[in-house]
Image: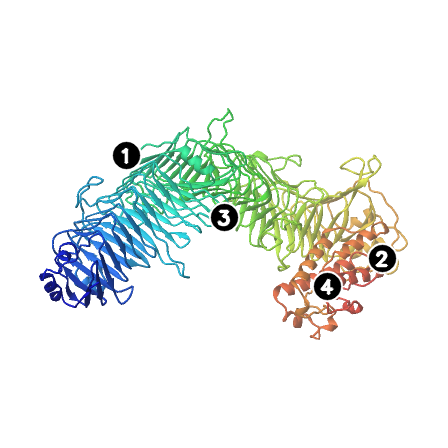
Amino acid sequence: MAQIRMKTRALTLAILMATGGLAQIARANPDGGDVVHGSAEFIFGEDYLRILTGDLTIIDWLSFNIDAGYTVEFLMPGIDSRVLNRITSGVPTEIMGNLLANGQVFIANPSGVIFGNGSVVNVGALYAAAGNISNADFISGVHRFTDARGIVENRGHLRGDFITLIGGRVANHGTISAPNGTVVMAAGEQVLIGEHLGRVFVQIDVPTTDADLLGSSGDGGLDLAAGDVFSLAAWNTGAIDAGAVTVHGGSGRTVVSGDILAQMGDRGGDITLLGHSVELRGATVDASGGAGGGSIVIGGDPHADINGDRSQHVDIDADSVVRADALIAGDGGSVVVWSDSFTNIDGQLSARGGVVAGNGGFIETSGLRGLRISRMVDARAINGRGGHWLIDPTNIIIAPGSLGSLGGWGQTDTAVVGVNLINQALNAGMDVTLTTLNPLGNGSGEIVQMESAAFLLSSGVGSTLTLNAAGSILLHGGAYATNGSSLSLVLVAGDPNQPAPADPFSNGRIEINEVLSLGGGSLSAAGNSILVRSRNISNTGEVFVNAGNIELTARDMGAITLGADLTATLGGILLDGVTTLTRDISLSLDGGWYMEATGTVLSRAGEYHDLTIDAQGGIVTLAGGVGDAGERRVGTLDIAADLIRIGADVRVSDGMNFYAPVSVFGDSVVFHTGLGTALFADSVYSEVYGQSDIAFEYDGEAWAGVGEGRTPFKFRGSIGVAPLVDGPRLGDGYGGAFRNIRFGSDLAGSPSVATFLFANAAMAGLDLTSLSGTDLSTLFQIVATDSIRTGRGQKITSFGSLAMTAEGAGSTVIEVGDLTVVGDLSLRSLGSGGLVRLLGRVAGSIDGQDNEGDRDNPGTADEGAELIAMGDILIQGTIAADSVGTMMGYNPTVLANESGSGSAGSLPIEVIQGGAGIDRFVGMFKGTGDLLYAYDLAAFASGPGPASQANLAEAFANEVPVEFRIDERLLAAEQVLRELNFATRTMADATVSEERLGPRSIIRDAGPIDRSGDGVALLTMDRLSRKSVRRLTRSYIELLGERVSADSAERTETTRVRRELGTLWVAWNKSGRPKDVAGFAENLDPGLRQTLWQLTRTIMAIDLLELTPSEIRHARRTLLDTVLPDTVSATELESAWFPMTPGGITLSQR
């Protein structure tokens, strides 16, 4: 076969053509090649033309046709080399044969490019444009095509890494295969093809007119007819190349009636179909892959710039399929169908997860002015979680049935979505979101659920339904999850991420007007205002929200209006904003774990609705409090939980009940119980020690004159310390005392009655003890405008000084049982006829018969109350004591008078009171008021040698600290007390009994304790752990808070209590530091210095319990043994004890 070789310039090729030998070639094959840039060598054969070119070669042709059976092949330096073939004849290029190239071939013919039936193109890349490209753009790599008015049509088979067809009208009726790249089909007069961040983009910048589906050239349309196959399959060479199909119809129509397949390795590829309108007619658009679905965009990206390429209309007929599935193992891909005007979808859309593993994908169906969809989308996952369906037109009506209606093209901006489609998707395990996406912000942006369009989930799956509106959300149809299903409902009105709606009535409100029964799902609602109101259901008049998490959020000082009961079965309830009750409301956690209100919970003005919170097993937090000081108080408040946290005032009109520990974290909190009773069934404490004030108030006029039978405040637990049990506990880990405790008038100072009662419960009491090692000088105050009553048998323990003051204008009463304080104790009843009553404690049954003189319950005997203080004891007011068991203080003073003032004195004597046993009273009674004792009294004074009544009276009169002891004879109580100058001394049923006391030591010099004295055990800081400090503190509190007798019957119990005491310091002689307090204090932080003082007082308390020497030794050894550091042996325990003489007080062994 003869070969003709021609080089470089077109002149040689033209001469050969002129001889007639190439006449046939000239008529049907490339004609008139003129190399205007680069180099080219032409080799002719009988049925082929081989062209050897350099890079960036430009050839101008009179024509560039290829007959059937003829082959034109470009041989270039490499796959990235490019050759531009420009045709200037004004006649379309017709390629009926074969076009081959190892590089990139550009064909630019403004009159059109036709690939006929049977034609084959196999190139590195093909750019076939019915337009022009300038030499400068080509050489510089800018793929800008202009004057693209002609037709580009394919009926053959095109193959290459990058296939681009550009024209005024582009049609494909054959196949296009891009094994390692991208297919772009763009219709428009000016087209720019480029890459950005590894993705191909197409810019079209000339409007053209629509034409019929198969209309004439110049209509700006793009047809992909039956039989079209675009397949992108990247070769798996260790790297994955980007692959995509982009079909851009410009301002014309894009009609797809064939198959488009996009794949990138084992994953689906990217498919983009754009045009003024996009129509799928029996088409298959497939971006599926074995390991995951790809991405399909039909009509444009609604989240791109508002001036970006987006279609006005999209229509997918019932015979079309669009899918981005994971075929084997992987997540489904994404399918977006969007138009700036109206979208109609009758075909099948899917983004399914893999059959082996994988979650469902994402599907978005939207029309800015209207949407009609007649078939459920499919984002299911057999072995994973269902995918997500997003519906986002401008306004949405959720209607009964399956088929929504657009109301006619161009007639409405509202999409009507059949609720059956939503329910089908939810029951298939998919999540569904309806969003009023409107970039222009010129609609109402509302989502309205019609009355008969209920959301129904019954397949046993868990799904989420989200309604996201620029305007308001109005729910009239309800939501129901049954058969173990779990429906989570998210409501966002007035979405700040969307343009504000033009309609001023669409103000971001949420209205829930029907039942929401969500199974184990959650409810989250955020809006400018939220209204939950009831609707008659089976004549119950209830709206019941049954959900895992319920979150109602009011933004920008908005409000939540609650007229429905809420129940969370698996999660919690959050009311994020001021909440108004329009009826009696119940909030319940049935297996949930929290209920929180960030704003104040109010009742509608003057209506005083009740609020019941049942959160057993969970935590209730009322950060904004309940009620106000006016007419928006709640009626009755009842809360049951594991823990109740209060951050602001709680004000009700008809009482409150807290059936859990109450933890206060606000700076100042008032509990105002109105006309009802407040019950605190467990402890009340501050989350941070000493950082909160607490006050207890109620409507004084209504409570005036009430007695013990009906008191406004009842406490069954401690005030000031969290319960020392496992369970929810916040703050410093143990809770702490309050900065101030006040009973009586409100913060404005208006008067109110303040009778204060601890209910009769075994472990009740006012506990002002801190477990945080805070300064012992803290003064805890309980001030009442009338009376303070703690109840018989109840304990009050204070880790600092304690002052109780009843300071009303009328008769006031302080009525207390056992009191134990570390510092000073002051009981002052300052009203006219002020009374301090010391209540005895019930000790046990007396075989059904009343003990003589017992004034409370027949068949029981009373033991005396204990008043124990490590500092001074001051009692001011007329004293009435049912029985005094023990009064221990280092400067006890009793001022008993009617006027509230009296002379002070401090003579320690020992008074032994009978009745239920022999106890001791260390102190002195002195004053000008009345002194009343109800039981037998025998007084003894300890001192050397016999003493007479005169001796004792002289000691009283002179107020000198003298030891007295009566070994032989009894001094009658009447004679002893006569010298105390009380106005009256009444001894109810007083009798005289003879008691003999063995030798015993007493406290010498009852002056104040000097905390800087010698004899304090020392310990280096590295020997003290935080755990040990906590143990010591807890044990110390238990020692002071429990009354432990040392008689033989209770010896075992005594030992048990001692074993529960905490840490003591290791032997002072092991420290190697100066043995004085000042030197030791320099090496301790404030908390440890405080613990040292606590320890000193613990040792004092042990010595005051009248233990035997062996018991004292055993208790001390037990203290050390409890928390003994590993570096100290048991044999070193003996050296850990020493005599202590702070302030001249000697605690000696007996």
Spot occupied by residue 684 in the image (x, y as percentages of width and height):
61, 47
**Label 4: which secondary element:** loop
Towards the viewer: 782 or 611? 611
Protein image colouring? rainbow
Q: Give neighbour class at mark 2: few <14, some 14-19, many 20+ (Cα, 10 Å).
A: many
Amino acid at circle 1: Thr
Amino acid at circle 4: Leu
Task: Estimate the spatial distance between the alpha carbons at disc 2 and disc 1, rounded to whole Å.
Answer: 107 Å
Q: In this figure, which residue is indicated by the disc labeled 3?
A: 357
Task: Estimate the spatial distance between the alpha carbons at disc 3 and disc 4, rounded to whole Å.
Answer: 63 Å
Side of 757 where 552 appears, left or right: left
Between discs 3 and 2, the one toward the N terminus: 3
Side of 396 where 71 appears, left or right: left
Spot occupied by residue 547 in the image (x, y as percentages of width and height):
51, 39
- Image quadrant assignment for residue 676: top right
**Label 1: which secondary element:** loop
Residue 901 appears in the figure: no
Between discs 4 and 1, the one toward the N terminus: 1
Towards the viewer: 280 or 938? 280
- Image quadrant assignment for residue 1103: bottom right
Side of 206 where 15 appears, left or right: left
Q: In this figure, which residue is indicated by the disc labeled 2?
A: 965
Mark nearer the viewer, 4 or 2: 4
Q: In this figure, which residue is indicated by the disc labeled 4?
A: 1064
Residue 1142 sits above or below residue 591 on the image: below
Between discs 4 and 2, the one toward the N terminus: 2
Residue drawn at (53%, 50%), measured in percent from left and top? 666
Q: In this figure, which residue is indicated by the disc labeled 1?
A: 412
CB of mark 1 within 8 Å of CB of mark 3?
no
Mark nearer the viewer, 1 or 3: 3
Spot occupied by residue 143 in the image (x, y as percentages of width and height):
22, 59
Amino acid at circle 2: Arg
